[in-house]
Image (tube, rainbow, N blue to C red):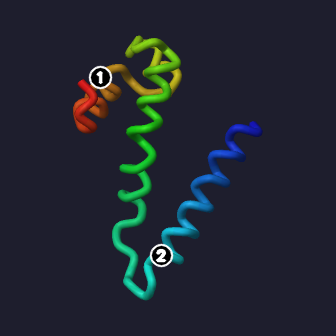
């Protein structure tokens, strides 16, 4: 679970920095922004760890292989 704590801390610190950097501007669509920034590197790392095996990557991610392929297409990774 220590890895989970590290991920939570990294996201928290990044969001805190995001709010500091706004410099008075209103935040916009934070949820979608965070997901868009996190999803692609997560997919890249998991695919690297599975040596490109999409079936195994989908299993590690806890998603259907077709869902993984759609996400890879959305991020221009295939």
Q: Position of residue 31 (x, y in %)?
A: 41, 60
Residues packed near mark 1 inside 10 Å, few (<14), some (14 to 19) or many (20 plus): few
Residues packed near mark 2 inside 10 Å, few (<14), some (14 to 19) or many (20 plus): few
Q: How many marks?
A: 2
- Viewer-proximal residue among 74 and 16: 16
Q: Position of residue 36 (x, y in %)?
A: 36, 50
- Viewer-proximal residue among 62 and 30: 30
Q: Secondary structure at mark 1?
A: helix
Tag 1–tag 2 contact (CB < 8 Å): no
Q: Position of residue 6 (x, y in %)?
A: 69, 46
Residue placed furthest toward the right: 2
Which residue is found at the position 43% from the left and 56% from the top? Answer: 34
Looking at the image, residue 73 sits to the left or right of residue 6; the answer is left
Q: Secondary structure at mark 2?
A: helix
Q: Which of the 4 image quarters holds residue 68? A: top left
Q: Position of residue 14 (x, y in %)?
A: 55, 60
From the image, state whether disc 1 or disc 2 is nearer to you: 2
Q: Quadrant of the N terminus?
A: top right
Q: Quadrant of the C terminus?
A: top left
The residues bearing labels 1 and 2 have C-alpha atoms spaced at a distance of 37 Å
Q: Can you identify the residue that label 1 sits on?
A: 66
Q: Which of the 4 image quarters holds residue 13? A: bottom right
Using the image, tell me which numbered label, if any, was put on residue 21.
2
Looking at the image, residue 76 sits to the left or right of residue 25; the answer is left
């Amino acid at each position: 679970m220590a890895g989970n704590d590290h991920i939570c801390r990294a996201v928290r610190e990044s969001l805190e920095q995001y709010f500091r950097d706004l410099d008075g501007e209103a935040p916009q669509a934070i949820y979608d922004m965070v997901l868009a920034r996190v999803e692609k590197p997560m997919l890249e790392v998991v695919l690297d760890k599975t040596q490109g095996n999409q079936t195994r990557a989908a299993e590690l991610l806890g998603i259907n292989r077709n869902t993984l392929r759609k996400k890879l297409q959305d991020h221009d990774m295939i």
